[in-house]
Image (cartoon, rainbow, N blue to C red):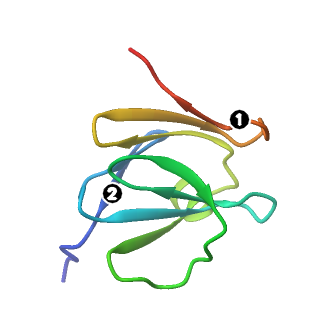
Amino acid sequence: MLENSVTYSVNNSTIVLRDEKKELLLVTPPQYQNILVSRYEVKFVDMGPTKRSGMKNVFLHEVFKRDKTFFFVKAGDVEYQIDLKYEENPITTMKF
């Protein structure tokens, strides 16, 4: 049986938030905070990957099959570049 509550999709190195009423918690490698993706913003949080209603947990090593530190997130109409090796400012809004 297919799950109808899939809130995101992955295309190459881009994670797209598909259900704008829900949020994603991107669970990163242990040296980084996790990343909260909502319709309005992408930000680092210290939330753990516990189950919460309205939020889908996405483990990056499961999505990309390895510890990936460079990828893109599309939330609403905005795309963000996330490069965790830049510890001071890893989240950049993409402008086209």
Q: Helix, strand or loop at disc 1? A: loop
Q: Secondary structure at mark 2?
A: strand
| Quadrant of residue 7 within the rendered picture | bottom left
* Total labels drawn: 2
Q: Identify which amino acid the numbered label 1 is placed on.
A: Asn
Viewer-closest of 5 and 53: 53
Quick one: quadrant of the C terminus? top left
Asked if residue 68 is positioned above or below residue 50 in the image, the reply reads above
| Residue matched to label 1 | 89
Crowd tier of the residue under label 2, counting other residues whose Cα lies within 10 Å: few below 14, some 14–19, many 20 or above: some
- Percent coordinates x, y for residue 10 in the rendering: 39, 49
Residue marked by disc 2: 8
Residue 5, above or below 35: below
Q: Of residues 75 and 41, which is closer to you in this image?
A: 41
Residue at the spot 71% in from the left edge and 35% down from the top edge: 89
**Which label was assigned to residue 34?**
none
Residue 15 higher or lower than 46, as above or below: above
Which quadrant of the structure image shows residue 69?
top right
- In which quadrant of the rendered view does residue 24 lie? bottom left
- Distance between mark 1 and mark 2 Cα atoms: 24 Å
Q: Residue at x 79, y 41 (%)?
A: 87
Q: Give the x, y percent position of residue 46.
A: 67, 68
Frontmost of labels 1 and 2 is 1
Q: Along the horizontal axis of the image, is 26 left or right of 96?
A: right
Query: Would residue 16 be found to the left or right of residue 61 on screen?
Result: left
Residue type at numbered disc 2: Tyr
Tell me where residue 3 appears, x and y as whole percent. Answer: 22, 77
Name the residue located 23 percent from the left edge and 62 percent from the top edge.
Answer: 21
Query: In the rendered structure, which disc, 1 or 2, sits on the residue that comes first in sequence?
Result: 2
